[in-house]
Amino acid sequence: MAHAHLTINPAFTVGPVRRRLFGGFVEHLGRHIYDGIHEPGHPSAGPDGFRRDVIDLVKELGISTVRYPGGNFVSGYNWEDGVGPVAERPRRLDLAWHSTETNQVGLHEFQHWLDLVGGELMLAVNLGTRGPKEAAELLEYTNVPGGTARAAQRAANGRQEPFGIAMWCLGNEMDGPWQLGHRDAEDYGKLAAMTAKAMRQVDPDLKLVACGSSGRGMPTFGEWERVVLTHAYDDVDYISCHAYYQEHDGDLGSFLASGVDMDSYIESVVATVDHVRTVKRSSKRVDLAFDEWNIWYMSRWQEQARTFTIDEWPVAPRLLEDRYTVADAVVLGGLLISLLNHADRVTSANLAQLVNVIAPIMTEPGGPAWRQTTFFPFSVTSQAARGDALRVLVDADETTTATFGAVPVVAAAATSDGPTLSVFLQNRHLSEATTVTIDLRASQPTGAVSARGIWDTDVRAANDLRDTQRVGLRTNDTARLSDGLLTVELPPVSWTALTVARTASDEV
Ligand code: AHR
């Protein structure tokens, strides 16, 4: 049995937990939109073609902001193709995913879907094959109340009121050689600054995200952020981070510690951002938008990548449809712990993606929609992480991993909104339970404790079409509170959320 001792004092905060930390991402990719969220003729679809069973699951997941329409897709996208009468919209080649884009869903339809799920739109502009002019025109279309050609076009297309979109991404992964219009940091930094200035001339009240690296493994990582921000620091509010994790060569121990990698990724980008701030003698703070993060078995996708012919442009092919296990869910819970522990600087984040494509929700055409294992840590954290993220002092036994060396056997984060304290725990031990003692004496706990999470004797168990409910949330009934000390036993390879009622006090 391993042991961990945690100390939590609600007076010691990291920062507020913003709702935008629980964002999602919907890209025109594979069966995400077509045959995913949008399936006219499905028994649960409304007259608008959107599946209500999927909408219910997205609401239950607790998604806030949704990034759209890509991703790699956006770098070849003409937003004008997706507005106006649906029957007149062009079918286009999607070069990013070698598919046909039918444009049956565009800006208006997607905003309508977001209204149904209660989400905020985060719109990405195409800086791959287009530039500041088209970005400013799109912004005129979405945000200018009236009196211009683009605003009139919007009204003619059925929407008198502006969309009022606040969050904008200045392109996508422009450091990646796979990106249409990929460029170096100097060129992208200048383009991002130019585009941001043009967009602010239309609407000064925007939150703009410059592209950071598409992963910390990129050869230009670090220098990319420094050079881009040297050009664009004064013009943007965020720099993006992207990270996808997977188990390599059966090394579950290292995979479980992926949060260690995310911690150091975030801290490296913060250091680089603040270096530029220092050099510029700026009082402005640029935050991090972790606008793509998830588990993605990218190596399987790369192995399967096909060579296409000129006449092969499928509509909504099955792409990137990873099936997630209990172990994957435990890792995803650990990544959420990392994000919460950096809530002071990561003030926006998007799980990539949402439905069918590396997604917590799966659907079958004409059939059911179901929750993947990764759905559970996300939905519980989104619901329970409220108020302020708190500093957690962790004194734990260690476990040795091939990639990260010795790491604490338990990862932890905590939040409190006053009356409730939530603690999120990941046990990284492959075979042993860990007893955790949490010193909550400064938190005035009242005694009402609940603990739920995800673990299984078969860490490879998953939900799929054959058994959509094999894995679900479990209740951990080992939690005990006595004299302000809470003890709980965490099963091996597990993720757990504790909620503790507090005597609400003013200092929180
Ligand atoms: O999320 C899938 C893809 O991953 C996105 O389109 C791209 O931005 C990233 O490389």
Image (spheres, rainbow, N blue to C red):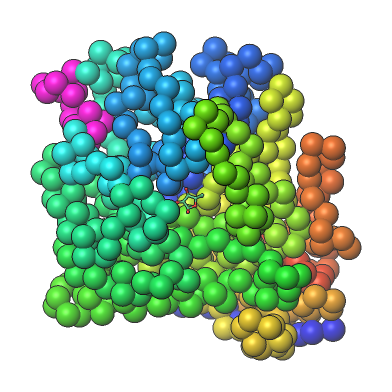
Quadrant for the N terminus, please.
bottom right
For the point 35% across and 39% down, which residue is it? Answer: 76
Q: Position of residue 307 (x, y in %)?
A: 57, 44
Q: Is residue 354 visible?
A: yes
Q: Relative to residue 293, is residue 333 drawn left or right? A: right
Look at the image and say whether residue 28 sits in the magenta stretch: no
Asked whether 72 or 481 is in front, the reply is 72
Asked whether 356 or 176 is in front, the reply is 176
- In which quarter of the view is residue 34 placed? top right
Say if 333 sits above or below 222 in the image: above
Say if 35 sits above or below 397 in the image: above
Q: Position of residue 21 (x, y in %)?
A: 46, 55
Residue range corresponding to the magenta coloring: 138-152
For the point 64% across and 87% down, which residue is it? Answer: 405
Specify the principal SS of the magenta part: helix
Q: Single out the residue that lies furthest toward the right.
A: 457
Q: Relative to residue 351, is residue 142 drawn left or right? A: left
